[in-house]
Image (tube, rainbow, N blue to C red):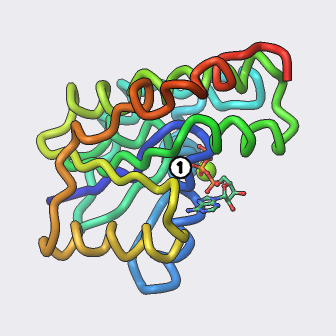
């Protein structure tokens, strides 16, 4: 494993888990920091950087193991851990950030239909999936470390929010809060 991507829909906890990993001595860099470092930021839309991904992929050649965190980080790594979060919890988190309704719903929908997982499966050699919904940030960090150390695998495919939420699905997709 040359680089590990800590990826997932906005709000699932990537940066929070990254902070714990840094405290434990792992080298963790954010996708945006990398984009800035390699001069690959080409714009800003909706408070998010627009990154020249092809240029960044060409320029980023890690010499030693590094963890990259961000919702596009899977494009830069051979292994990805996709953090997942119950869409109802995610919706509340994103609303608390003060994001506008449309942006919240876009991201809740993306989580509901496994968007990032599907992308990661497309571009990475190895993909793990961790449900963070009922875990503390420290517990999630421990699970990430167990993957890094080769002690555990979290194969994707166990999470099915649409079936799990069942009766709550209307609550998830309701456009008026
Ligand atoms: N396991 C968890 N349990 C409870 N709260 C959590 C957990 N993980 C993250 N949070 C909270 O959720 C919020 C979003 O977390 P964070 O900023 O780490 O997400 P992110 O995946 O980095 O989002 P973004 O892609 O937008 O940067 C924070 O307020 C954080 O404290
Ligand atoms: Mg973050």
In the image, 91 versus 53, the foreground residue is 91
Residue at the location (51% across, 54% down)? 133
Quadrant where the C terminus lies?
Answer: top right
Horizontal arrangement in the rendering, residue 148 relative to residue 30 (left or right) = left
Q: Is mark 1 within 8 Å of ligand 2?
A: no
Taking the view exactly as shown, the residue that stands out farthest to the bottom is 24
Q: Is residue 130 left or right of residue 169?
A: left
Q: Is residue 147 above or below residue 110?
A: below
| Placement of the N terminus among the 4 image quadrants | bottom left
Give above or below for 63 relative to 72. below
Residue 106 x %, y % = 63, 18
Residue highlighted by disc 1: 37
Name the quadrant containing residue 157.
top left
Q: Nearer the viewer, residue 131 or 170?
A: 170
Task: Tell me if mark 1 has few (under 14), some (14-19) or many (20+) residues whose alpha carbon lies within 10 angstroms of its own.
Answer: few
x 51%, y 23%: residue: 110
Q: Is residue 147 visible?
A: yes
Residue 105 position in % (x across, y down): 68, 20
User: Which x, y percent locates residue 141?
Assistant: 42, 71
Identify the residue shown where x is 87% and y is 37%.
Answer: 98
Depth check, front residue: 122 or 162: 162
């Amino acid at each position: 494993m040359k680089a590990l991507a800590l990826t997932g829909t906005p709000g699932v906890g990537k940066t929070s888990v990254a902070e714990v990993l840094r405290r434990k001595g792992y080298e963790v860099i954010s996708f945006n920091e990398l984009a800035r470092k390699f001069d690959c930021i080409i714009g800003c839309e909706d408070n998010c950087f627009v990154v020249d991904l092809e240029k960044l992929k060409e320029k980023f050649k890690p010499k030693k193991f590094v963890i990259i965190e961000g919702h596009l980080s899977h494009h830069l790594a051979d292994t990805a851990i996709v953090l997942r979060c119950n869409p109802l919890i995610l919706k509340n988190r994103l609303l608390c950030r003060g994001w506008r309704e449309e942006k919240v719903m876009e991201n809740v929908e993306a989580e509901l239909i496994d968007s990032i997982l599907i992308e990661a499966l497309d571009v990475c050699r190895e993909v793990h999936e961790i449900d963070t919904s009922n875990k503390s940030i420290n517990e999630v960090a421990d699970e990430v470390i167990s993957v890094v150390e080769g002690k555990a695998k979290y194969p994707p495919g166990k999470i099915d929010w649409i079936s799990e939420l069942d009766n709550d699905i209307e609550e998830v997709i309701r456009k008026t809060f």
